[in-house]
Image (cartoon, grey):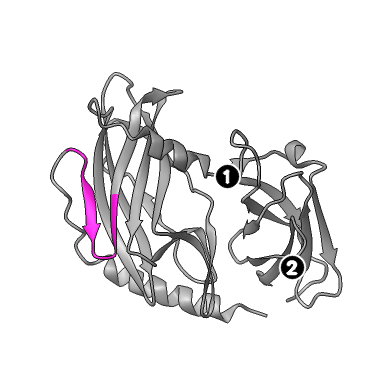
Amino acid sequence: MQNSFHHYNLMYILVVFTCFLLIPPCEAEPGSRKASLDPTSHSRLIASGGTQQGFYRAGVEIILKPGALTYWRQPGDAGVPPLFSFDGSENLANAEVLYPAPSRIREDEGEAFGYRDRVVFPLHVTPRDMARPVVLKLTADYAVCETICIPVKSHMELTLPLAPGQSQDAEITAAEASVPVRLTDSETSGKLSVVSEVKAQNPTWDLTWKDAAPASDLFAEAPAGWYFETKPTATAGMFKIVAVEAPKTDAAAPVSVTLTLTGLNRSADEARNIEFSIQLTRVKPGL
């Protein structure tokens, strides 16, 4: 069975998104900290002061219209992930974009994975030459969705290090705290079980997170051609993973899936969102 809703809406949004990319970008506010304004959202670059471990801590802040949403890197049933380009930046060796854990947003015809109201995507900005400033130039393409989805193309610019008094360390720290912590196989050993449902119509697995702090939600990311639905169950820490789309070839081969568990009820100094990879083997060929 194919997820026709996913294919139809994603294709429609991609077509609209491509058309809107031809529209000139939003004008930036004056000043060294340039931001982009749009009727559906306000985006800007922010940063904390100084460097840490050889990089600057910065972020892309997007403030949305009340009730609107934008998407995570895996957008769910329909939607487009944000795209970030740092072309034209000066003295930039690397800019790593981090993604805060998403929320499951239920809509009339499906589910979106993303953010409402406001999101800050943390950035780790590494200079080529630590003795020279970095002029960070960012083009962000993202969708803002209410009853319809409007693509936005924003141009932003920020010079690092910041001038005294401009640091927004608290906002960057809060955004980084919501980014899932990556766990190794040894760190998940004994805390995780994955059991196949042999009689399910579509390949299905029951995943149980056995940690003392059960998670509240689960999100799956897989290679191209695959799409997995994830569903919380009535049992704390237990989720269903259902393969609703799969490639025609290599039907029986194991597939590597990245899983994100969110909302772990832990102490303030422990990760509340985690991610890790597992191998899923299909019970039967074909969908």
Marks 2, 1: nearer the viewer: 1
Position of the N terminus by quadrant = bottom right
* Badge 2 vs badge 1, beta-carbon distance below 8 Å: no
**Can you say which quadrant of the picture contains the C terminus?**
bottom right
Q: Is residue 225 visible?
A: yes
Residue 273 is situated, as x and y percent measured from the top left of the image, at 60, 46
Stretch of the chain drawn in magenta: 32-43
Q: Residue placed farthest to the right in the image?
A: 198
Q: For mark 2, what is the residue?
A: 251
Question: How far from the left and from the top, in percent, is residue 247?
Answer: 65, 69
Name the amino acid type tagged 2. Answer: Ala
Q: Residues within 10 Å of mark 1 (few under 14, many from 20)?
A: many
Q: Nearer the viewer, residue 22 or 40?
A: 40
* Nearer-the-camera pick, 275 or 253: 275
Image mark for residue 239: none
Q: In the image, is 39 to the left or to the right of 69?
A: left
Asked whether residue 95 appears in the rendered view, the answer is no
Amino acid type of the residue tagged 1 in the rendering: Pro
Q: Residue 30's x, y, as percent? A: 13, 45
Structural crowding at the residue carrying mark 2, measured as other residues with C-alpha within 10 Å and reported as few (<14), some (14–19) or many (≥20): some
Rendered residue at 64%/37% (across/down): 267
Q: Marks 2 and 1, how far apart in space? A: 30 Å
| Residue located beneath label 1 in the image | 180
Q: Secondary structure at mark 2?
A: loop
All told, the count of numbered labels is 2
Instruction: Check disc 1 and report its element: helix, strand or loop.
Output: loop
Is residue 172 found inside the magenta-colored segment of the image?
A: no
**Residue 253 rendering spot, x and y as whole percentages:** 76, 60
Quadrant of residue 220 in the image?
Answer: bottom right
